[in-house]
Amino acid sequence: DVVESYQAMREYLREVSRCLERVDPHLCNNVGLVARLVDWEESWEMGTRYMQHQPLLNAICDLVAEIRRAQRVVPELTSMCEECDVELFLVLPRMIWLRFLAEPVQHAELLRSLLPHRFSGGEVDAKGVADDPIWDGEVEAFLQSYRGLRAVAHNGGTKEQKSQRTWEVLVRRVVSGSSSQAESGMNRAAEESIEQLMRSLEQWSMELQRHCPDDWNQCSSILVQCLTRPGDKPKPGPFRV
């Protein structure tokens, strides 16, 4: 978007140089110019926020990779992304939290950008290291409930196998929002822990979307663009000064 909006501005200037007599001296009255400047400003704001802050950029890239991994487990997530289904925007905040629970320090800066009042502690450096506590007590309790689930989930198998099966169950729950047969291989304590975790996850997901809707819309827009890989922006139509 940053490059495309810049190129669109350059193309406008080249085109308008051939008809300067049509340019209104009051530049705000030139519809084509205003549209390209607004697009350029919005794109640069997003680029500055997400591309120049390395921990935030790393979190976005990791999250996109995690969602693509989840698409192989739950194929309907792929169609949600391709069609920009309304349910996708319920799934995305759940996926952000699920990834945070698995890699809290790595994703702390992304959550801080959306919930600064919850993540007012130490900064994470470019290497993903933080010296001081980053999140508040309620987030820590949520994190501990996830760790408790991983400790009791599934009987048998190696640590890696248990972790993979637990992740698959949680991804299916995050996408479908309901229990599934995938949980049949879990013990009763794990099933109860999952139900408790999912209830908490819904509350945290709602807070993520509602605390600052503008920030959330910007973040979800970037994720959708990364997941759908759209082509160039559609042409704005006939040239307008």
Image (cartoon, grey):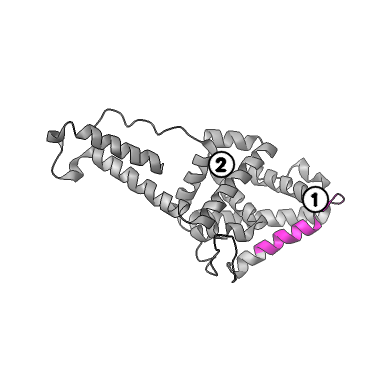
Q: Position of residue 53 (x, y in %)?
A: 48, 56
Which residue appears farthest toward the front when viewing the image? 127
Asked if the residues shown at circle 1 and circle 2 are in contact, with their CB atoms under 8 angstroms apart, the answer is no
Q: Position of residue 198 (x, y in %)?
A: 67, 53
- The answer to which quarter of the image holds residue 180 is top right
Q: Residue at x 78, y 41 (%)?
A: 181
Which residue appears farthest toward the right when viewing the image? 156
Extent of the magenta region: 142-162
| Mark 2 Cα shell of 10 Å, populated few (<14), some (14-19), many (≥20) | many
- Judging by the rendered image, the residue that carries numbered circle 1 is 162
- Identify which amino acid the numbered label 2 is placed on: Leu
- Judging by the rendered image, the residue that carries numbered circle 2 is 88
Q: Position of residue 40 (x, y in %)?
A: 33, 45
Task: Please name which of the two marks, 1 or 2, marks the residue nearer to the observer.
Answer: 1
Q: Is residue 43 above or below residue 141?
A: above
**Magenta stretch containing residue 157, yes or no?**
yes
Between 218 and 40, the residue placed more toward the observer is: 40
Which residue appears farthest toward the bottom when viewing the image? 132
Q: Majority secondary structure of the magenta segment?
A: helix
